[in-house]
Image (cartoon, coloured by chain):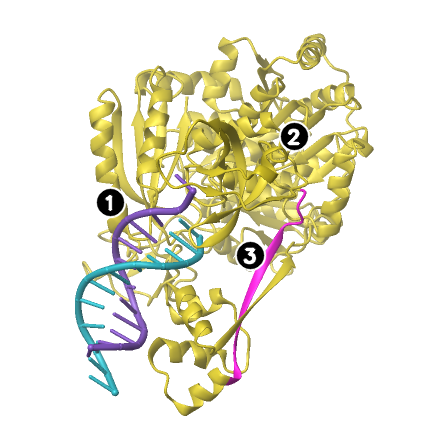
Chain colours: A yellow, B cyan, C purple
Amino acid sequence: MAYYCEVSFPLPLLQTFTYRLPESLVNRVKVGDKVLAPFGSRQLAGYVLEIKQLEQEPAFKVKEITDLRVNSSSFSASFISFIKELARKSLVSPGQLLDLAEVYEDQEVIKVMVKLTAEGQARLERGDIKGRKKEILELLKGRKLSPVYLKRKTGIKNINSYLRVLKKDGLVDIEEKQVKKRKSSSINQEVKIQLQLPLSLTEAQEIKQIIRKVREKVYVEFLVAGSWSRRARYFSELISSLVGQSNYILILVPEIQRMRRWQELVKQQEELVIFHSQLTPTQRREALRRISSGRARLILGTRSLALMPVEPVSLIIVDEEQDELYYQTEGIPFDGKEAARLRAKHENGVLVLTSSCPEISSYYWHEKAETLLDLGQEKMVCDYQVQSGEGTQIFRSELKDKLIDQVRERKPVFIYVNKKGYAGYVQCARCHFVPKCQQCQIALSSNKPGQELSCRYCGKTYPWPEKCPVCGQKMRVGRVKGSQYFKEELAALLPDTRIVVLEEGNDHPEERALHKALSGRKISIVVGTEYALTRLWPLTFSLVLVVNPEIGLNLPDFRASEMVFAKLSAVTELVANEKGSQFIVVTELPDNAVLRLAIIPDYRGFYEREIEIRKLLGYPPFCPLININLSGNSIRSSARLSRALLEQMQKNFPEAEIIGPKVARHFWHHQRKEIRFYLRFKEQSRLEEFINFLYEFKLKYSSSRLSLKFWL
DNA sequence: AGCACGCCGACT
DNA sequence: GTCGGCGTGCTC
């Protein structure tokens, strides 16, 4: 009887491949090892997921493992079983996840450069090369280029097959170099705030309960809700009573900026390690040395921290658990929260979800299971008011006076705007026609009246329409104004004041410089989008204005209210909570309950209202909802695939209600289109079966890019 | 993903 | 009749 093993490669292939283990390796290779194996015409490194003995060779021809490769991450068998389950639930390749988990390897990127040989040069000058080959060689004249650059420049899709032929003919040289690629860290390290408020009796008891569960080594999940300052003091207490033992504690945050506030609450700084993708190689090595030596057992990081191969992990904390960034992230599509949950299950650890605005479903299920601790919110003592109307209100009457007064008193102002750029769109004053991008079918945005319009997704520009193409009337800028509009209007209203716009992709002062300038009163006004919220923390303002937060309430998403509530209540954290500070919301929907509750903020009130709506409309937590995204090279092939999928779903799961499909844009790659649909089930009973069905479907159509996200 | 294979139009 | 551009399908 010979030994065989199942190998998964870091390729987008769900299936594993069977190899025979040669005599020399039988006693050396174990589950979790990295091996080199022949795969088609190449040699690839993959991960061993299983080792087995077989009576006879399988029906297909089996190749032999070439060699064992040393991977210092050394995945244990239990870690592999965790990865296998996560991969199956996420519809991704186990090999890709393991590749991500392999943190100890200095992540080496092979940099490929192509250059012209002497012969290539000569042949090119003789002029006996034509077509695309000539095009490539011309570009390479006198310089080295990467295949990616050549691909972009020439538009040739299969650039590699061209390069291979050119290399075979001796016209180009392809050199490969191992490069260590790391960006520099941008995280502000110096935050120190002391919060020393005593814990309440229930809080202290709750902490004891979690500590007991951690010690008993049983998997349980808790949800800790409440304002950050209350949670901070709670977790500071919890962490310091658990740290210093031989177990690891992982703290997950949705984005790097969010780490700062956890950094400051850890009392035993020497136990804390920060681990994320933007560390320099030196910082990274140092962090790993401290982790593996056991000197530091408290690790703070983003989503992929759930895959950190350290053991045993006794506690995982997921901060801002409602944040979409846990699943809408570049790279391999997996849900960070789900990964943390599975990890905790596999290691018999405790999972603590926490947020100031938990997902409605999380709150519901935890309240039902009596694993919820709601620490509540601070009472806001500032003056707040809701003003009816559009954003331009802030330049009129009393709001204008308030703004001017504030600036005159040299107190900084924060203005929260929902939109980047100048204004949302351009509109005909009479027939309300809105020009759209021919390619993307979204409203074109304007950076300035009279100047050209551009598409936020594809970047294509269009001339300013002098007249409405439908009715001939003059066009004007739409009512929804963006950050740049406010900046310009404010600059006109208050000359000689410094105004900063904090939004994604915009040039603004370095964080440290910004904080310094604000506390030193050098900057008077900050106009910011959602992007600004995490970056301004822990600064507070005595005047905060919110402009049209109702945008987003009408998004076709069952979580629209939840997300608007979360964002708006996050703004309240920037209001200095003292007498005399002001929080002003200008909105078209002054009576909207979601907005009203968000500014207090009253999460519990919002929850009670929202849960009724969910019940009425049949959304999670009452009916599980699954979102499926299909994307591919061409919309045509994705459409074909979606038809096949829909047909099979209807046949196998007639009880599921299918919402969609509709063509949408990729959240990350706006240029890429995808087919998106939702599936609503009446109950959870067949959910697992459904995920298995999707897995089999993807296995069959292996070229498809299919991802899913489920809400229970 | 990345590679080989094989089909079809363009050009000696 | 050959070359090369591009789509299709397979990888234990």
Going by the numbered disc 3, the residue's amino acid type is Asn
Tell me the subunit letter for badge 3.
A
Q: Which segment did they paint magenta? A: A104-118
Dot 1 corresponds to which residue? A639
Name which residue type carries label 1: Ala
Q: Which residue sits at x=65%, y=36%? A: A74
Distance from label 2 to label 1 (Cα)? Answer: 40 Å
A535 falls in the magenta region = no
Q: Is A574 on the left or on the right of A419, as rendered? A: right
Q: Is residue A411 left or right of residue A351?
A: right
The reply to the same-chain question for discs 2 and 1 is: yes
Pointer 2: what residue?
A251
Q: Is residue A626 above or below residue A469?
A: above
Q: Nearer the viewer, residue A90 or A207?
A: A90
**Camera-nearest label, 2 or 1:** 1
Amino acid carrying mark 2 in the image: Ile
In this rendering, the answer to whether A56 lies above or below A118 is above
Q: Which residue is mark 3?
A: A506
